[in-house]
Image: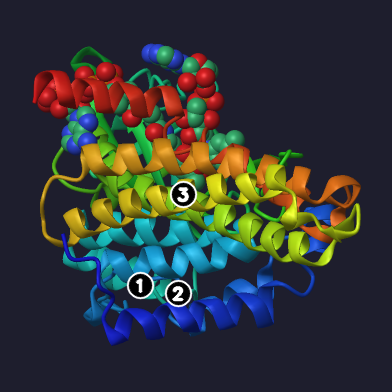
Amino acid sequence: MDFKLTEEHIMIRDAARDFANSELLPGVIERDDKQEFPTEQIKKMGELGFLGMMASPEYGGGGMDTVSYVLAMEEISKIDASASVVMSVNNSLVCWGLDTFGNEEQKEKYLTKLTTGESIGAFCLSEPEAGSDATSQKTTAIDHGDHYILNGTKNWITNGSTADFYLVIAQTDREKKHKGINAFIVEKTWEGFEIGPKENKLGIRGSDTHSLIFNDVKVPKENRIGEDGFGFKFAMKTLAGGRIGIAAQALGIAGGAYELALKYSKERKAFGTEICNHQAIAFKLADMHVAIEAARLLVMKAAVDKDNKENYDLSGAMAKLYASQVAMEVSVEAVQVHGGNGFVKDYHVERMMRDAKITQIYEGTSEIQKIVISRSIING
Ligand code: CAA
Ligand code: FAD
């Protein structure tokens, strides 16, 4: 497989790296501390085209391939995983979902605003009693002819209060189980839509996570995505690509932590020499480097599969499972390499360690990725 980057790929990666260093790095510690959403930075990311990278140019998107997207995700995540989850949800769940499955009117009305960052999107599948077990939706959308009435609660929704448009998955006909599920575009200003309190999180604290309450929200029929009953497939197909983005996020967190550990180990002296000269530290760096390169190959394989229109359910799940494990392991070791300094906020690696954990939980936990992988290898 040819993983050689084109000049355009390199340009996009470097632009994302420059942006992350100049715009996201200053203030990243304070935003984490205060749980502050990176409002200005996200606005600039929209202006630079980082929020609708893969969407069709006729709707304001960048028309770029998945490889470009994962390269940019990796660079942004090296510095600020809170900003990169906003980028990930907007790009690979909301914009991709609408671009691929929305109709012309929906794309004109919503996608054109989401690709540019004029509006932000959220993807609402999880519920208090339906996380991994995503078919047990309790939120209902009852058909009333020209509209649906939406009732229920979604939780853990990224961009929960900052979004303008929400893709909401709900049960229209419980008898039909997953075939009775639909996906809808809901606007923030609609009557009966309420945003719950913000979650106080371990990591990605600059991102904005809320529960959402729908109380007799009237959703026009034209806001349903796809045919009646397409909602669960919509969610699964969209998440399959989303997982590649989260894998790239994990890769970026791991890479960021490794780069800091390498630099620190060349500066910090103990027992008369830089600590990288102690084999125990040198071997940690070697293990980190190998794990990151292996994760990168899986992430690139999944991205290339998607770009080549091959099936990427398996490669995306493998990339997410492995890269998230690497993010966790590498960030823990990066703290260790920093000694006491690793345990305080100024050195960034403790934040990266906290941020890494979420990559093993959202967009399908590691156990769910193993379900997807094992079903695929057993059933073909
Ligand atoms: N593409 C298309 N269709 C798919 C599919 C895919 N990748 N995966 C499943 N389906 C279809 C199946 O074919 C089946 O349809 P048919 O009966 O017509 O064949 C239907 O969906 C049900 O599939 P399963 O029987 O496999 O369903 P299941 O109940 O066993 O669950 C699961 C499968 C993979 C565990 C799924 O429930 C799942 O992915 N759970 C995790 C949920 C998740 O990832 N949530 C993330 C929320 S968003 C988020 O987290 C964003 C963020 O943090 C930033
Ligand atoms: P559960 O499903 O209750 O799982 C608990 C444990 O049991 C996990 O370890 C799980 O792996 C394991 N488990 C469950 N079933 C099985 C099984 N069959 N076999 C083996 N192990 C199993 N959701 C959205 O829809 N949109 C968002 O934007 C979003 N953003 C999020 C942001 C954050 C910060 C967080 C924390 C979550 C977010 N989520 C979002 C929700 C996320 O996708 C869910 O938390 C995740 O899918 C797991 O669901 P759960 O929390 O209900 O855990």
Amino acid type at mark 3: Val
Amino acid type at mark 1: Met
Q: How far apart are the two marked residues, 3 and 1, measured between alpha carbons? A: 29 Å
Q: According to the image, label 3 marks what residue? A: 290
Which one is in front, 191 or 266? 266
Tell me if I can see residue 57 in this picture.
Answer: yes
- Element type where label 2 sits in the image: loop
The answer to whether residue 237 is above or below residue 361 is below
Q: According to the image, label 1 marks what residue? A: 53
Q: Quadrant of the N terminus?
A: bottom left
Tell me if I can see residue 230 in this picture.
Answer: no
Horizontal side, residue 114 vs residue 288: left or right: left
Horizontal side, residue 76 vs residue 351: left or right: left
Q: Earlier in the sequence, mark 3 or mark 1?
A: 1
Q: Quadrant of the C terminus?
A: top left
Query: Viewer-nearest of labels 3 and 1?
Result: 3
Q: How far apart are the two marked residues, 2 and 3, measured between alpha carbons? A: 29 Å
Amino acid type at mark 2: Phe
Quarter of the view holding residue 156: top right
Coloring scheme of the render? Answer: rainbow
Badges 1 and 2: C-beta atoms under 8 Å apart? yes
Quarter of the view holding residue 57: bottom left
Which one is in front, 339 or 13? 339
Judge the density around disc 3: few (<14), some (14-19), many (≥20) Cα neighbours within 10 Å: few
Question: Which residue is at a point 67% across and 61% down the rendered structure image?
Answer: 262
Question: Which residue is at a point 36% across and 32% down the rendered structure image?
Answer: 170
Q: According to the image, label 2 marks what residue? A: 50
Question: Which residue is at a point 66% across and 49% down the rendered structure image?
Answer: 204
